[in-house]
Image (cartoon, grey):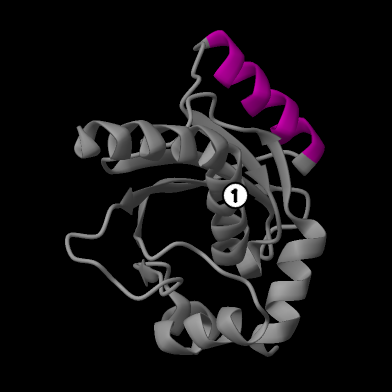
Amino acid sequence: MDLEEQWEKALGSTEVLKLRLPRLATFEATEISYIFLAESLVNAGNTVIRRGKVFVHKPAIILPGNLPYFEDFEFEENLNVSEETVKTFFLVRGISFPSLRFKHETSKIDVYEDSLEKAKEHFKEELERAEDIHAGLIVGLADCWQFSIIIYAGMLMAKSAPSDLKKFEEKFKEWLK
């Protein structure tokens, strides 16, 4: 399956059941924790659980606009494409991400021995009981999980954009004084 098909599959199948509540940090790195659920490709009726984090780092130097860096998303291992190919893929389609570094870290991959629907309810309840406002709950397809996680990060950036602009404006006004 080519990159275009993987992207389209992820767009059509990614479902965000719970967004992290706090907005992304404007002037520092943000850790985005997630639980990703997908039907198992190996054991029908089971659910694969991927727990991880994406660290959205602010660039240390000024970078050209809309040239993100995606690290450790396993594009080469799982999709047989390089990070550069993925960046070009997004660029050609007019999909832009800020010039930030997105570093992925998987902390645990496990199996929930029941259906995806039951797993959704179980993990929603788990996050509610723990009052976890920092973790997101995402559902997608196991073979294009990377794109589902990137879609989730993009949603969080869009949610944070209005407050970020206001903070940048305030910072700029302070700088002018």
Judge from the rendering whether residue 12 lies leftward or rightward of residue 130; answer left or right. Answer: right
The residue lying at 66 percent from left, 40 percent from top is 113
Residue 118 magenta-highlighted: yes
The residue lying at 35 percent from left, 76 percent from top is 64
Which of 57 and 17 lies nearest the eye of the viewer?
Answer: 57
Residue type of the residue flagged with mark 1: Tyr
Which of 123 and 134 lies nearest the eye of the viewer?
Answer: 134
The residue lying at 50 percent from left, 20 percent from top is 133
Residue 140 magenta-highlighted: no
Return the residue at label 1.
152
User: Taken as a whole, is the magenta stretch helix, strand or loop?
Assistant: helix
Instruction: Give the extent of the magenta segment.
Output: 117-129
Mark yes or no: residue 82 visible: no
Q: Quadrant of the N terminus?
A: bottom right
Judge from the rendering whether residue 28 lies leftward or rightward of residue 96; answer left or right. Answer: left
* Residue 91, image x, y percentages: 57, 82
Judge from the rendering whether residue 4 lies leftward or rightward of residue 82; answer left or right. Answer: right
The residue lying at 53 percent from left, 46 percent from top is 157
* Residue 48, image x, y percentages: 60, 50
